[in-house]
Amino acid sequence: MTGSRQELEQLYNESIKIIKEGHVVTGKIVAIKQKEVLVDVGFKSEGVVPITEFSKADLEVGKEIEFFLESIENDAGNIVLSREKAISIQGWDQVVKFSHEGTLIEGRPVKKVKGGFLVDVMGIEGFLPLSLSAFKNIADKDILYKSFQFKIVKVNNLRRSIILSRREAVQKERDVAKDRIWQELKIGSIVPGTVKAITDFGAFIDLGGVDGLLHITDMSWSKISHPSEIVALGGKIEVVILNLDKESGKISLGLKQRMPDPWSDIVSKFSVGAKVKGKVVNILPYGVFVELEKGVEGLIHVSEISWTKRINNPQEMFAVGDMLETQIISVDKDSRRISLSLKQLEQNPWLDAESKYAQGSTVSGKVRGFTDYGAFVELDNSLEGMIHVSDMSWTKRIGHPQDVLKKGQKVDVMVISVDSQNRRIALGLKQLQENPWGKIAEKYPLDTVLEAEVVNLTDFGVFVKMEDDLEGLIYSSEIDKDSVSKLNPGNKIQVKVIKVDVEQAKIGLTARI
């Protein structure tokens, strides 16, 4: 009997778990009462836990959960357990682990205090300094009792207190989001974005954590002056991924690529010789750009505006928005260029210019403009001819055409030559008068000595006036340098004729008499 009693006692003792105070143990809920819950932790007596320490999800008979063993036996002979302390201990272990790993942890700000917020993290009270909160310009009602991710930046094991940072968590969330987006992005895919910034060369688009550049040349098939014509700050937009460079962090985006390229079938739409209408969209010194359809522009070069008029400034003739009918003279798909012409719509007046303006005939015209070497004369309100300075006077040296003619002046001129192919008409003013050089040669034979008036001093000689509209040149070799240095325009000087060139209309003189 004695041996049997000892065996039973041994079996009883072995069935009881070895548990210690101050440890977390696993227990099974065996009964739920109004104010308390009975828990079996495998000891000879059951534990009692206030019902207020349980969540609704945990209140279930037979459910096994963990408790903190405060005392093996109280005055009533029951084990004293705490669900809240078990949660706190487990939470602290997790906190320490997350702190070491740098893992983000979820928490809820529950109170605003001086210098920051108190945050509930797994049942542990943490402190979030304002400087690390990232809650600038956010109302308290949108912060308190809302869940956020935090990074644990400091742990005090003795006090079981932690310092949190929302700012570092936000940065980590952004980094994670960036990595995720980089993994998701693919060249050719269409993605949504928000216009973050606009510059002269394009717009930066936020793709949800990473930025891409939408260059101005990839915004529209049509030419635009500034990105703000297409996008607005803060605007939502869908763009195509053109290129990805994760190493440099650069993403190239396109907007026009979402639409068909209007130049892909340009040859079938616009053929050489066809007449087309379009709107003037840009005017430059070398020509006028005309929009033929969205994304397709042609250029009227200044040389294709008029058969007869010299176009120095197209802005004097056209304005942006003007509607023009033009003729296509070339289409270059590869270079994306269309050349247009206005003058091709009119008959070329140069075709019958030679028959209309016979060589040697006298015609009337109006002076339209000047260059340093001549004057342009409009003939019959169509073609223009030019009087070269050398054809303005038989005897007078012309410094500038405006010394002889004025703009708008009507003049009679002789047609010297007509070159239809190169579109040139040479006109003469002096040819309407008799060439006086035969008589001049008779009047001033070689060795004639006379007094002349200094007109101009040059490196190659001194020009002097022999009579009205007649000048001669004292060669530099025919006058002493000392004498030249003392001369001024208007001075009188004795000269001798040493050369009369009737062909070249020149008189050579010497001051060595």
Image (cartoon, rainbow, N blue to C red):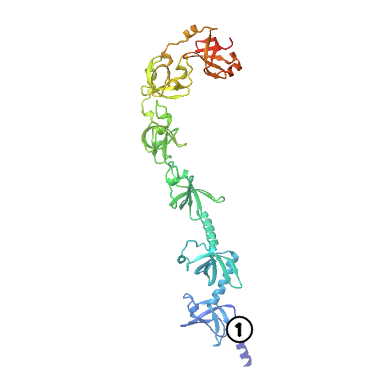
| Location of the N terminus (image quadrant) | bottom right
Q: Amino acid at mark 1?
A: Glu
Q: Is residue 35 above or below residue 456?
A: below
Residue 295 location, quadrant: top left
Rendering coords of residue 443 (x, y %): 49, 7
Q: Is residue 182 visible?
A: yes
**As drawn, 232 above or below 21:** above
Across and down, in percent, residue 227 comes to: 45, 46
The residue tagged with tag 1: helix, strand or loop? Answer: helix
Q: Quadrant of the C terminus?
A: top right
Residue at 42 percent across and 44 percent down: it is 260
Label 1: which residue? Answer: 14
Give x and y (percent) for residue 121.
Answer: 53, 69
211 or 359: nearer the viewer: 359
- In this rendering, the answer to whether 375 lies above or below 333 is above
Up the image or down, 15 lies above or below 239; here it is: below
Q: Nearer the viewer, residue 308 or 367?
A: 367
Toward the bottom, the furthest residue is 1
